[in-house]
Amino acid sequence: MQVRSAVIPAAGMGTRFLPATKAVPKELFPIGDQPALQIVIDEALGAGIDHIVVVSSRDKPAVAQYFEPNEALLNKLDDSGKTALAERLRSIGRDWRVSIVYQDNPKGLGHAVGCAREAIGEEPFAVMLPDELMGSSALLAQMNGVYSSTEGSVVAVANVPRELVSSYGVIDPAGELSADGVIPVRDLVEKPSVEDAPSNFIITGRYVLTVDAWAEIDALQPGRGGELQLTDALKAQAARSPFHAVVSDVSRHDTGNPLGFLTASIELGLTNPELRDDLRAFLANLQV
């Protein structure tokens, strides 16, 4: 079955960005002239996904409002001759479907993903963490292909220096890395010590999961920090079913902290045809 739906967990408080996130959800912070959330959605659409399920919080009404039409604003843009901008706003959710669901009591990533089950139904799905911005849709498209050929779940991974592994989920490979960057997975370990990590391949916030992942998510018990960990559901899948990782060669930007967000804004700004020349000139003349 083709993967047509993606879950984007966006219910977090964004405490690393306070006080800004007291009023504006971090997912709506702009990268150039686009919200970070829209960049993730565009990645999904480019990989053939046409149903976006955003898991939000009722304390973040701006997330739902982003997808709602504003006729007064559209009419004002049309009347002032800004028809291209008006059309850009009208395109949000026009050729794809968005569902907003709520995580009323945050209990971890596994719980957040589980909140999307009714909206998606009994079908395979992607999970896309909005703190991770990818440079293109190529990685997710490849993951969809691996899912289709193996009929098993797939995670994206990156090869990092050994000293960084304890901050991430890490895969335990069951075989060698293939020429196209695919690794069979035996197990997954959440934030292992440097000494105990089974590899240097960390999970990077993109998942394509088979439909039976829902049952594993439903069966989750509280783990580290009393939360329901998505990694525990994936471990159960890897123990009994085909499970693979795809090593990403797509550029990746971690916006989970202010410095990462700032550097992502600069790097992605340098790829924007409307911004890159002026931005490059500014950086060249910057006194540091």
Image (cartoon, helix red, strand yellow):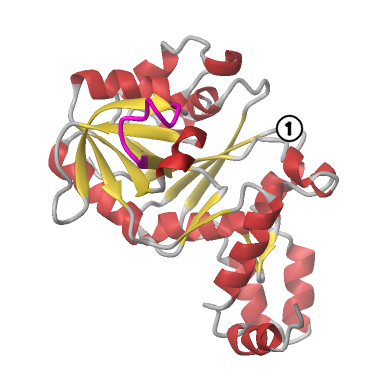
Horizontal arrangement in the rendering, residue 124 relative to residue 13 (left or right): left
Q: Can residue 95 be seen in this view?
A: no
The stretch drawn in magenta includes residue 100: no
Q: Splitting the image into 4 quarters, where does residue 266 fall?
A: bottom right
Q: Position of residue 29 (x, y in %)?
A: 70, 57
Q: Where is residue 111 in the image (x, y as percent from the top left)?
A: 53, 22
Callout 1 amino acid: Arg
Q: Where is residue 170 in the image (x, y as percent from the top left)?
A: 38, 34
Q: Disc count in the image? A: 1
Question: Which range is magenta?
Answer: 192-201
Closest to the observer, 79 or 283: 283
Residue that badge 1 annotates: 58
Horizontal arrangement in the rendering, residue 267 relative to residue 13 (left or right): left
Q: Splitting the image into 4 quarters, where does residue 219 fall?
A: top left
**Placement of 287 over or under 168, stated as above or below:** below
Q: Position of residue 272 (x, y in %)?
A: 55, 79
Q: How crowded is mark 1: few (under 14 residues within 10 Å), some or many (20 or more)?
A: few
Name the residue located 49 percent from the left edge and 49 percent from the top edge: 97
Closest to the observer, 28 or 233: 233
**Placement of 172 over or under 16, stated as above or below:** above
Horizontal arrangement in the rendering, residue 23 relative to residue 34 (left or right): right
| Main SS class of the magenta portion in the image | loop
Horizontal arrangement in the rendering, residue 86 relative to residue 155 (left or right): right
Q: Is residue 157 visible?
A: yes
Q: In which quarter of the image is the C terminus?
A: bottom right
Q: In which quarter of the image is the N terminus?
A: top left
Name the residue located 67 percent from the left edge and 62 percent from the top edge: 262
Residue located farthest toward the front when viewing the structure as drawn: 195
